[in-house]
């Protein structure tokens, strides 16, 4: 075992499979004690099982590490409090929170039910808040801590994923604000938009949507278009970067979002105005009709032009 995260204590949600599992194993392998949270459900969040979390805990213990399992649903407020209490009661402190738990209920917006919208928002966005709030209470008292939130490039726009995209881009805004709330206390909060082969991402329909995004210019050429034929797109590649962000070496990195896919690690820009028009007296509709096409809106590309 390594010692890069020696004596650290981490909570990793959605840690029973995929990226979360790799993060838990990587952190444990570097000396951290881990609270392994996983509801154990299907991709859409239905059903529940203790098996995924238990198997990860067993793997960590076989390797000589320290871990405990938690099977809570992060969309429920009390789960976050229970996770933080478990870390403090079992390991004496909390240093790292990785908000990774997630589900998918994909549907075109005109077919999406309120329940499909609500459930995805609750697991991803509410889940991040439910865990971060009690963690930040502990972090503020000890004047240190690391929060890593899992976002997605889907937040930039992805067909059939209005619920998921809204939740994941909401996490970016949440990350930036928590970074500002907590930075003065020695706490950092960053987000990652990961791409890796997991049961959520290695699907034909998502690959097709990604190809469309690249073709329309929404996504850059570094976005994965076929995980089956791309070497190195494993969850472990994401976990290594998460471990670094969770370390003392990353103390100056706060409020940013990163792309991590295979050997590629990218830093996203912070939003800013790229051009503007100003009129101190305000604009009339006639003035805007004349001015906008020649200034702000002329040449803008429609990512999904009419098919008729």
Image (cartoon, rainbow, N blue to C red):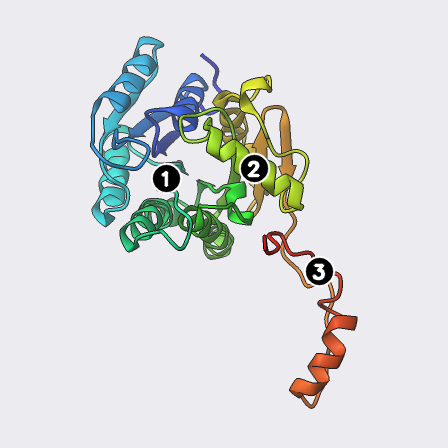
Q: Is residue 79 above or below residue 241?
A: below
Q: Is there any visible trace of residue 255 in the rendered image? A: no
The CA distance from mark 1 to mark 2 is: 16 Å
Q: Secondary structure at mark 1?
A: loop
Disc 3 to disc 1: CB gap under 8 Å? no
Q: Give coordinates of residue 184: x percent, y percent.
A: 50, 54
- Residue at disc 3, secondary structure: loop
For marks 3 and 1 on the same chain, the one whose residue lies earlier in the sequence: 1
Q: Nearer the viewer, residue 180 or 98?
A: 98
Which of the two discs, 1 and 2, sits closer to the camera?
2
- In x, y percent, where is residue 288? 70, 81
Q: Extreme right residue here?
A: 294
- In this view, the residue in front, 67 or 72, is 72
* Residue behind mark 1: 104
Q: CA distance from mark 3 to mark 2?
A: 21 Å
Q: Which residue is mark 3?
A: 300
Using the rendered view, name the quadrant where residue 273 is placed.
Answer: bottom right
Residue 145: where, in percent of width, then height?
Answer: 43, 41
What residue is at 28 percent from the left and 37 percent from the top? 45
**Mark 2 secondary-structure assignment:** helix
Q: Residues within 10 Å of mark 3 (few under 14, many from 20)?
A: few
Disc 2 marks which residue? 210
């Amino acid at each position: 075992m390594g010692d890069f995260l020696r004596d650290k204590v981490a909570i990793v949600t959605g840690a029973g499979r995929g990226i979360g599992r790799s993060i838990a194993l990587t952190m444990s392998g570097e000396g951290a004690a881990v609270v392994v949270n996983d509801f154990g459900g299907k991709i859409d969040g239905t059903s529940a099982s203790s098996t995924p979390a238990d198997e990860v805990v067993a793997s960590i213990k076989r390797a000589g590490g320290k871990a405990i399992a938690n099977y809570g649903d992060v969309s429920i407020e009390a789960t976050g409090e229970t996770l933080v209490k478990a870390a403090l009661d079992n390991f004496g402190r909390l240093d790292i929170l990785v908000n990774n738990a997630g589900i998918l209920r994909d549907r075109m917006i005109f077919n999406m039910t309120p329940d499909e919208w609500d459930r995805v928002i609750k697991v991803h966005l509410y889940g991040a808040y439910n865990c971060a709030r009690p963690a930040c209470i502990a972090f503020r008292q000890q004047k240190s801590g690391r929060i890593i939130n899992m976002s997605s490039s889907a937040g930039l726009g992805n067909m059939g994923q209005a619920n998921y995209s809204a939740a994941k881009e909401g996490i970016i805004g949440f990350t930036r604000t928590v970074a500002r709330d907590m930075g003065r206390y020695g706490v950092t909060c960053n987000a990652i938009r990961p791409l890796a082969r997991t049961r959520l991402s290695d699907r034909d329909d998502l690959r097709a949507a990604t190809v469309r995004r690249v073709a329309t210019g929404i996504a850059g050429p570094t976005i994965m278009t076929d995980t089956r034929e791309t070497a190195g797109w494993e969850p472990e590649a994401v976990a290594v970067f998460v471990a670094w962000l969770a370390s003392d070496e990353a103390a100056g990195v706060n409020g940013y979002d990163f792309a991590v896919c295979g050997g590629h690690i990218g830093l996203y820009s912070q939003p800013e105005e790229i051009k503007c028009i100003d009129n101190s007296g305000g604009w009339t509709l006639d003035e805007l009709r004349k001015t906008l096409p020649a200034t702000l809106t002329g040449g803008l590309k429609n990512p999904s032009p009419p098919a008729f």
